Image (spheres, rainbow, N blue to C red):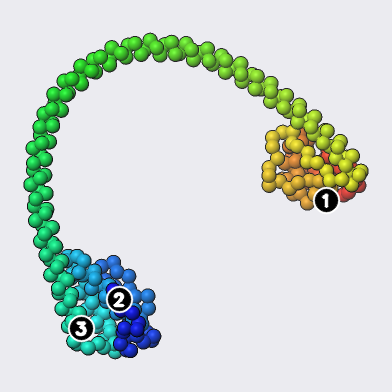
């Protein structure tokens, strides 16, 4: 656990940063360097390195390298601590290292026992392989039975193919019905178009807000601006005007001027005020 600011010596609790290179905090332990170069942060970084050393014996060498780099950098920056404190910290580190070595020895003994168990499992596996070979003969017999069942399945497939042919005929009939329904929908949309245009002409005379006029062909793009009067038509670009003309099934030539296209749209919607489009 790192020391709190109130428990640190006055020198270590200073808010000034030391002139230490960032390379002093590079290490092989994947430990992040201190957030700044204040004395307190550097001491906390050292404590983290020491704790990492004690947690795994194989990282001792890398840990000491990291500590040596920081100690050299601290010395160059004028950050000195008492030799007694350093010796006490090293003594504690050596004790933790001894505990780590004891743990490694215990782990080695445990691994040796696991190897013995693995050998016993190998013998058991051999017996299971023998049983598997015996099962192989039984499997062959089942395959023979499966081949006999395959013949029966072929007959069922033939019956399914006959049913499929009948289904295709029904689908063809349904497709024809859908085509007829689509034509009917076009007629309904055309009727709705003329009804809405007539209603909007009446609303225009009464200064009422017009109703949306649905497309006859396809659906209106939600991003296409709404058209309620001549001003809305005047703000449309060429592509937008053509989208409206296509939707309302109004014929036009490919090279027709935009002002003529806008006039066609206005006339179709019966917005017949004298207005010159650009």
Residue 242 falls left or right of residue 230: left
Q: In percent of the image, x 42 and y 11: which residue is there?
A: 158
Q: In percent of the image, x 76 and y 49: which residue is there?
A: 236
Image quadrant assignment for residue 219 = top right
Kindly identify which residue carries mark 2: 2
Q: How far apart, in angstroms, are the residues tagged by discs 1 and 2?
A: 73 Å
Q: Earlier in the sequence, mark 3 or mark 1?
A: 3
Q: Which element type, helix, strand or loop, lies under badge 1?
A: helix
Compared with 216, 68 (above or below) is below
Q: Which element type, helix, strand or loop, lies under badge 3?
A: helix
In-front residue for pair 223/136: 136
Extreme-front residue of the structure = 6
Q: Which element type, helix, strand or loop, lies under badge 2?
A: loop
Q: Nearer the viewer, mark 1 or mark 2?
A: 2
In the rendered picture of this protein, how many numbered marks are placed on residues? 3
- Look at the image and tell me whether residue 251 can be seen: no
Q: How far apart, in angstroms, are the residues tagged by discs 3 and 1?
A: 85 Å
Kindly identify which residue carries mark 3: 86
Quarter of the picture holding the N terminus: bottom left
Compared with 193, 177 (above or below) is above
Residue 41 position in % (x across, y down): 34, 79
């Amino acid at each position: 656990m790192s020391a709190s600011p109130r428990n640190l010596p006055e020198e270590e609790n200073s808010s000034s940063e030391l002139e230490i290179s960032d390379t002093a905090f590079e290490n092989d332990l994947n430990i992040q360097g201190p957030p700044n170069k204040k004395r307190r942060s550097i001491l906390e970084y050292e404590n983290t390195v020491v704790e990492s050393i004690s947690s795994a014996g194989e990282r001792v060498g890398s840990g000491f390298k990291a500590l040596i780099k920081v100690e050299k950098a601290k010395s160059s920056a004028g950050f000195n601590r008492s030799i007694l404190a350093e010796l006490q910290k090293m003594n504690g580190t050596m004790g933790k290292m001894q505990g780590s070595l004891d743990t490694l020895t215990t782990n080695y003994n445990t691994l040796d026992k696991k190897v013995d168990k693995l050998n016993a499992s190998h013998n058991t596996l051999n017996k299971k392989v023998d049983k598997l070979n015996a099962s192989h003969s039984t499997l062959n017999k089942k395959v023979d039975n499966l081949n006999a069942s395959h013949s029966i399945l072929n007959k069922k497939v033939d019956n399914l193919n006959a049913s499929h042919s009948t289904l295709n005929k029904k689908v063809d009939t349904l497709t024809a019905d859908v085509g007829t329904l689509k034509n009917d929908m076009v007629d309904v949309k055309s009727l709705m178009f003329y009804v809405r245009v007539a209603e909007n002409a009446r609303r225009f005379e009464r200064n009422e807000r017009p109703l949306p006029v649905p497309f006859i062909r396809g659906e209106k793009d939600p991003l296409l601006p709404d058209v309620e009067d001549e001003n809305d038509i005047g703000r449309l670009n060429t592509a937008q005007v053509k989208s409206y003309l296509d939707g309302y099934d109004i014929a036009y030539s490919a090279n027709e001027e935009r002002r003529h296209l806008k006039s066609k749209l206005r006339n179709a919607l019966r917005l017949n005020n004298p207005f010159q489009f650009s």
